[in-house]
Image: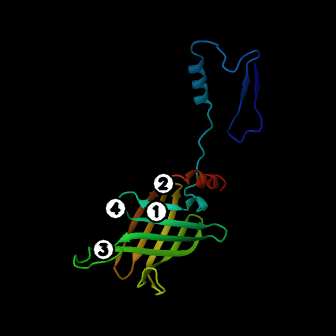
């Protein structure tokens, strides 16, 4: 047998074992697979210890939802890492149901879209929250945008965000845990996180 180990990172090891005269699937003994698995488990690469929070990166571009209250509330994030800016759109609802006699052709009077855009620093973005209203569907009527509050986004990991908000006129504030709606971008996010 030949044993080889070279160029490993601190705390890691790598070995290549070759059985002279062996085939691709050697028969050594009845418990060969068990012993091999035991060895692999005892010599596996130690798990990487991640930083407290993961820095925002392009892998965060995704739809995120409230993990506790699954009533459809959520945010969509677009991170621009070259300029360290982040855009957030937040779909939520009004504080109370509107009157039943209010009829809308499109959408619902209780739906709210907030947006926020601004810089981030590492794992944190402190942004002004804007409400867009008064626009007309598929027309040249310009909507009005007004700052209605503030939001702080903190990245915990590639699958967890923390949103803290304050909406001034409504006098409401709170915190929302967010998780990904889909996990397709998690490996992409983790590839950036490993470089930090």
Direction from residue 5 to residue 154 in the image, left or right = left
Which sits earlier in the primary sequence, circle 2 or circle 4?
A: 4
Earlier in the chain: of badge 1 and badge 3, it is: 3
- The Cα atoms of the two marked residues, 1 and 3, are separated by 21 Å
Q: In the image, 169: left or right of 102?
A: right
**Label at residue 95:** 3
Q: Residue 162: which numbered mark, if any?
A: 1
Residue 182 marker: 2
Badge 1 or badge 4: first in the primary sequence: 4
Q: Nearer the viewer, residue 130 or 175?
A: 130
Q: Position of residue 148 (x, y in %)?
A: 42, 81
SS type, badge 1 = strand
Q: Which mark is residue 71?
A: 4
Q: Secondary structure at mark 3?
A: loop
Dot 4 or dot 3, earlier in sequence: 4
Taking the image as shown, residue 191 lies to the left or right of residue 148, namely right
* Distance between the alpha carbons at the discs numbered 2 and 3: 27 Å
Question: Percent position (x, y) of residue 169?
Answer: 36, 83
Q: Nearer the viewer, mark 2 or mark 3?
A: 2
């Amino acid at each position: 047998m030949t044993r080889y180990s070279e160029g490993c990172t601190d705390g890691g090891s790598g070995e290549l074992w070759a059985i002279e005269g062996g085939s691709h699937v050697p028969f050594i003994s009845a418990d060969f697979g068990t012993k091999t698995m035991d060895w692999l488990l005892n010599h596996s690469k130690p798990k990487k210890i991640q930083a407290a929070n993961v820095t925002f990166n392009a892998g965060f571009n995704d739809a995120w939802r409230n993990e506790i209250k699954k009533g459809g509330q959520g945010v969509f994030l677009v991170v621009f890492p070259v300029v360290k800016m982040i855009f957030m759109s937040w779909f939520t609802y009004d504080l109370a149901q509107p009157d039943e006699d209010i009829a809308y052709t499109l959408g619902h009077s209780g739906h709210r879209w907030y947006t926020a855009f601004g810089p981030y620093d590492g794992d944190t973005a402190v942004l002004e929250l804007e409400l867009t209203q008064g626009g007309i569907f598929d027309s040249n009527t310009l909507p009005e945008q007004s700052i209605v509050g503030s939001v702080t986004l903190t990245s915990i990991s590639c699958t967890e965000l923390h949103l803290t908000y304050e909406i001034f006129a409504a006098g409401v504030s709170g915190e929302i845990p967010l998780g990904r709606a889909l996990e397709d971008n998690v490996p992409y996010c983790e590839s950036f996180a490993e470089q930090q």
